[in-house]
Image (spheres, grey):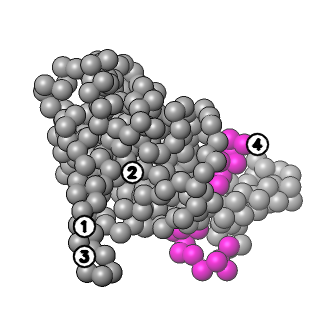
Amino acid sequence: MTEIKKIQQFDNGGAEAIKGFNFQKANLILLSINNYQKKDFKIYIEAEDDIVVSYENYRAFIQVKKQKHTFSTITKQEQKLIKAPEGKKSKKLLPSILEKNLNSGTEDDTFKIFVKEIGSTDKKQLNIKKPGAICSELYELSDTAKAKLIKALPSELTNKIENFYLYVSPIHENLDEAAKYLTGCLNEIDVSVDNNRGRAIIAELSLTIDQKAQEIIFDELHKELKSIDGDYLSKILVTCKALNEFESILESLSYNALLKKQIKSERLKIELNKTNLKADMKQAIIDYIEKNEDLETISNKDIVNYLVKTFTFTESKKSTLISVAIESLCELGDEL
């Protein structure tokens, strides 16, 4: 991938106006679910574009529009009234949706506009591409469509049209309906969605996206504040196998139903604000094992009680400490 050598223009629209963000948020979650296992996967919220996806040698800049669009609407330039200090007013042409999308990145990158639907006349000038690199199905431009769009672009952007695609999103603009669809997508990749866990995952990701969207960035260094990576997602999108392991250890501890419910609830929050605590607990388990050679006589409850007592000084809730302790045991078991 070509390195970014110039200072990029960053799109902080989401930080200043969250209204209308639900459709964009849901599409971002969909992209994350379907692609997080790719090598070096990262997804950026409101950076150079609405969404930026990167992995290995691939990078895509994505505009998200929850309306039906045509070639005419994506190339239309809006006028903005400018008032000069001396009081004179003038009109300034703003970049079109397509121009704004192509303004980012280089000719080696990919550019997409996500829409609810494409006008029927224009859709006839598009070819279906299955699958895309990060989407299940894309619309690529025919030569006729390319020629039409090139006429509406500045000359320095015309070469990028070769890597431009439209995507008709299956996401409903109502977030509740979108959550149902996304929960189904989680189930398809074997992520546990039982007992409302699917909706809890969507809610957790939504919160993270909202937090990232509010970050204001000015340069490449700050851009990482807007990213979610595959490592984070792999811990949030827990497979049935991993969750079953957590449940198995929890069941062996003989807690009452209310405490078990609290412990399960705390599990989702670990990757948001308890990663340091988990790392410390994993090291504490290693130290504990080294001091106790006869592991057969040590129960899961012995280890969990030891960790809860050791980390009481953190002033975390008991249910949080137990949840992190169980998760630490699960992860350490895979690593040893």
Measured Cα–Cα span from mark 4 to mark 3: 72 Å
Provide residue 150's location: percent of width, then percent of height.
Answer: 33, 31
Q: Mark 2, mark 4: which one is toward the viewer?
A: 2
Residue 124 lies in quadrant: top left
Measured Cα–Cα span from mark 1 to mark 4: 68 Å
Q: Residue at x 86, y 59 (%)?
A: 291
The amino acid sitting under disc 2 is Asp
The residue singled out by tag 1 in the image is 90
Provide residue 158's location: percent of width, then percent of height.
Answer: 41, 32
Segment colored magenta: 311-336
Residue 61 lies in quadrant: top left
Indicate the secondary structure of the residue bearing disc 4: loop
Q: Nearer the N terminus, badge 2 or badge 4?
A: 2
Q: Mark 2, mark 3: which one is toward the viewer?
A: 3
Indicate the secondary structure of the residue bearing disc 3: loop
Residue 88, label in figure: 3
Measured Cα–Cα span from mark 2 to mark 4: 41 Å
Q: Is residue 132 visible?
A: yes
Q: Nearer the N terminus, badge 1 or badge 4?
A: 1
Residue 336, label in figure: 4
Indicate the secondary structure of the residue bearing disc 2: loop
Let me know if residue 46 is in the magenta part. no
Predominant SS along the magenta part: helix
Left of 282 or right of it: where is 211?
A: left
The amino acid sitting under disc 4 is Leu
The amino acid sitting under disc 3 is Lys
Provide residue 248's location: percent of width, then percent of height.
Answer: 53, 46
Q: How many labels does the image show?
A: 4
Are the residues tagged 2 and 1 within 8 Å (C-beta)?
Answer: no
Are the residues tagged 3 and 1 within 8 Å (C-beta)?
Answer: yes
Q: Nearer the N terminus, badge 2 or badge 1?
A: 2
* Up-down relation of residue 175 to residue 166 (above or below): below
